[in-house]
């Protein structure tokens, strides 16, 4: 029987952010706020002669993940990895960060590497920055709650609060994160749109995020239609960053979002990545 470890990491819906360019991957990242969600990625890692990654998303199977493969190479192991998620990939749910944190948490235990939690997070963050898949999701996902990152990198000061009410979200398709993060013109608009403070509650997060989305020019026509429907119903809502979707607060949000696609009811996570089991 092949020795196997399984771990889980929550995802993260970013509401607004500003890129911070550092001298290396460790000091490059973002400030901003979002909500860590109880949906994310479950990763099963097995000892293997060479590394391979299989991605399962609600019955759809794909092969390969350059960030995960990079991270495993950084810790010096070969593994067969299967990541599983319910939420759509590339839709602003922080699943790249979740896959990295879950996989590295499992591999760290499986291979008895003894890497401290912040070391795992540092490698995951580096993989995100190198592959342009995220800037601040890893730091946020280290804990739960509505997270406001006040400096870049995984050791930034982060304020968190833990609302009981759920967040509702709808995805209208993927938005390639790299195409946004590598555009100097877009990043300049994003920097100018940054609100400059942390949210007080979920409604405030939606309001600050919406202002940011409008001023940054990132709202696509399909997203605009959903936001206008939320506005008409008095529902606090904004665009998932970076994803072609909408997140909203309040019980009435579910019915309005359902007109545009499958609605995901998401709880606010209470903790970050954790090991589920190790099978000998």
Image: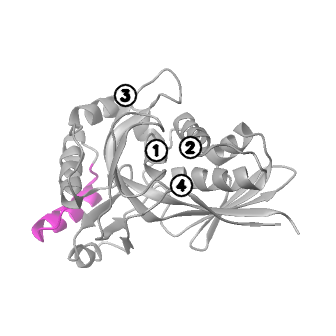
Q: Secondary structure at mark 2?
A: helix
The magenta stretch is 219-237
Mark 3 burial class by Cα count in 10 Å: few <14, some 14-19, many 20+ = few
Asked if residue 157 lies left or right of residue 111, the reply is left
Q: Secondary structure at mark 1?
A: helix
Mark 3, residue position: 184
The residue located at (80%, 48%) in the rendering is 78
Q: Secondary structure at mark 4?
A: helix
Mark in front: 2 vs 4: 2
Mark 2, residue position: 121
- Check residue 98 in the rendering and tell me which mark sits there, or answer none: 4
Asked if residue 18 lies left or right of residue 100, the reply is left
x and y, in percent, of residue 251 in the image: 23, 76
Name the main secondary structure of what is drawn in magenta: helix
Quadrant in the rendering for residue 190? top left
- Check residue 113 in the rendering and tell me which mark sits there, or answer none: none
Q: Secondary structure at mark 3?
A: helix
Mark in front: 4 vs 3: 4
């Amino acid at each position: 029987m092949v020795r196997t470890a399984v771990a889980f990491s929550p995802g993260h819906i970013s509401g607004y952010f500003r890129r911070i360019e550092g001298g290396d991957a460790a000091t490059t990242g973002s400030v901003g706020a979002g909500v860590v969600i109880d949906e994310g990625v479950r990763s099963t890692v097995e000892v293997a002669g060479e590394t391979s990654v299989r991605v399962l998303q609600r019955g759809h199977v794909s092969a390969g993940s350059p960030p995960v493969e990079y991270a495993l190479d950084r810790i010096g192991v070969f593994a067969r990895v299967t990541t599983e998620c319910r939420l759509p990939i590339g839709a602003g749910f922080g699943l790249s960060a979740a896959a990295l944190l879950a996989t590295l948490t499992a591999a760290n235990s499986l291979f008895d590497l003894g890497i401290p939690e912040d070391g795992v997070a540092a490698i995951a963050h580096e993989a995100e920055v190198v592959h342009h898949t995220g800037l601040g999701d890893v730091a946020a996902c280290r804990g739960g709650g509505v997270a406001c990152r006040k400096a870049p990198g995984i050791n930034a000061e982060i304020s968190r609060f833990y609302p009981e009410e759920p967040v509702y979200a709808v995805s209208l398709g993927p938005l390639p994160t790299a195409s946004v993060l590598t555009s100097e013109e877009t990043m300049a608009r994003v920097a100018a749109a940054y609100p400059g403070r942390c949210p007080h509650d979920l409604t405030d997060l939606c309001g600050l995020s919406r202002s940011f989305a409008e001023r940054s020019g990132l709202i696509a026509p399909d997203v605009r239609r959903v936001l206008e429907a939320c506005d008409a119903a008095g529902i606090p809502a904004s665009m998932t960053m970076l994803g072609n979707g909408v997140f909203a607060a309040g019980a009435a949000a579910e019915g309005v979002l359902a007109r545009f696609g499958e609605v995901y009811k998401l709880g606010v996570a209470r903790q970050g990545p954790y090991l589920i089991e190790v099978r000998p």
